Image (cartoon, rainbow, N blue to C red):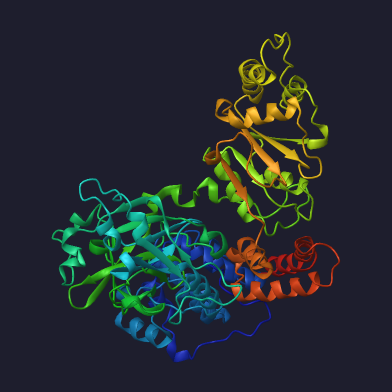
Amino acid sequence: MDEPQLMQPGEEPVLLPDDSLASPAELAAAVRVTRSTFRALYDQHVQAQGSRARAFMLLNLSVDDDRVAFERALRQANDQGWLSPFILSATEAGFFEDDHASPAARVRLQRVLNAAAGFLSAELFVPATIKATRQVCLVEIDGGASRGSGFLVGPQTIVTAWHVVARLLDPATGQPLPGSHQRIRVRFDYLSGTVAGRRGALESDFGVVPNWLVAGSPCHPLENPSRGTPGAWPTPLSELEGYYDFAALRLDGTPGLERGHQVLCRECGPWDGGHLVVFQHPDALPQRFALTEIVEFRDDIGRWRMAHQANTGNGSSGGLCLDGRFEAVGLHQSAIGENWNAAVPAAHIAATLGGEVLEMDATLTTVDRIASTKRPLLGRREFQVLAWQVAQGAYRILTVMHRSKEGNSFSVHILRSLLPAEHHQVVVLSASDVPSEAGALANRLLELVGSPHLHDLPPPVTTDAAWTRDVLFPRFAEAFEAGAKGRLVWLALDDLSKQPLGETAARRFLETIYAGILAIPHMRIVLLEHIGAVPGADDRLVVSEPRPQTQPVQDVVSYLMRRYGRRGLDDSQARMSAEVVMHIANRDQRPLLQAMSEAVADNIEPALEGFYAGH
């Protein structure tokens, strides 16, 4: 929550009409917060008045009764002429409770405003709405046969209502049915009848991973809306314990890196009469939001549900509920009876999820900058995704079919930036440095991983090919594994097009390694500028990075949103920045991606860093 704006010394107080304020005694009777909370805000206003005002503690050194202490503090503010701005700040922070005030105080407070609801900050409302709009999604099951709403809570994770996805879960185990991941689509940016498809917009359409259920909790059987009638709460209400009607879904992409995500409020919550804003897709319509007040958040209900009267419809389940401070306090759930809607407090969801929502599949983790240069990395996302798949063992050999305009060593720089050094080692051997003899090549490769040379190899007694396969390769594989010391060692063979390997024993040894790479579990091979099949290799263990299909503006938009989206940058601003980058890069003589990277680093990022540092 942002700090309230305080009146500065010498500033003229903006007073409410005299007849709109209750007396200090009546106001003190309406305070609903703790003494320490009241003191913290009060002393901020005292500090703004300079030396003429006394701090809350000094006013009440011998006062034990909170109500008396509050009255003394409010009387000082009244006498010195700054009661009105303090009341505005305190009301916005939810300090006053109408139900605990005298009738006279209640009437006068309501002439100021609804004391429980407070004010909505225009400064917070605009960025909070933009953020929520980007992060709320439409969840479609079986092509739209069932729909709900959801919102991002992590880079790769959304939450929605459990009952939205219940048809995809095994009733006995609560786990996803086989193949159910193919029946879920998640759509962001559904705002005006079609998913945003303008050039440069963020990726909007996602599926889920096969094991898509991160965590969840079913709804209570009486709440289940599938019966075609509004749900009901059980008696006693304590039976709602453990029934929180939410499901966290792991997506097959990472939209939260660009869009940001909501932080579920673990301790805060709205109060009776406080504002509630529900972002949703009612009846699968383009995104809507509804503003209301909390109807019930008493102890007998509020431990498990928030009752509200925001307009919702079929498809609103799983919608994002923000309070008047625009914090994520709940997940819209269902209709209860004829007049109420219900939401699940975010604290229950946050306690169940823990830190799992911030985790990502390793194969979707990419880097935005080259570690050695600190420059933006544009246009090589596919290479990074494939590298992770190779690291996890889906493949063992990665070929790069094109020559990077930044040089083949650029791919090596990407690998070293992407892969944690404690678990990976990237070594490079140029084709021009490959010796002609198989034994010499074996020892050269062992040097690169820090393993001793092979000695006392028996001489060939059969053909060279048989000796390489049956004698040299097993000894080499054993020594290489010992030198790897548990790390994955990436052997990058460079300049293969400039220095083709001739018909030598060393080339035949490399082909033996390609064929037997499964016998060296900690080896991965990257063939730079290699075209065609990998001789000797099992094609199922080889994956190739195609020539990048560069989308310059989109590359810059994605980069800027991943770096600054969580700080407030929206995709339209990112797109305008990308257009500036293209204007600069097109006048540069260097390769396009390099010129774009330099333009972002030298022009756009300093401006954005300066802007956000000042805000």
Q: Name the residue at 18% across, 55% down.
A: 239
Residue 36, position as x, y percentages in the image: 47, 59
Residue 53, position as x, y percentages in the image: 60, 71
| Res 324 quadrant in image | bottom left
Residue that extends furthest to the left in the rendered view of this protein? 235
Residue 420, position as x, y percentages in the image: 64, 39
| Res 28 quadrant in image | bottom left
Viewer-closest of 439 and 258: 439
- Above or below, 417 relative to 421: below
294 horizontally vs 437: left or right: left
Residue 292, position as x, y percentages in the image: 35, 79
- Above or below, 234 relative to 308: above
- Above or below, 449 relative to 475: below
Viewer-closest of 126 and 424: 424
| Res 22 quadrant in image | bottom left
Residue that extends furthest to the right in the rendered view of this protein? 589
Residue 423 seen in this snapshot: no
Q: Quadrant of the C terminus?
A: bottom right
What is the tally of numbered marks visible in this picture? 0
Q: Name the residue at 38% across, 78% down.
A: 26
Residue 486 seen in this snapshot: yes
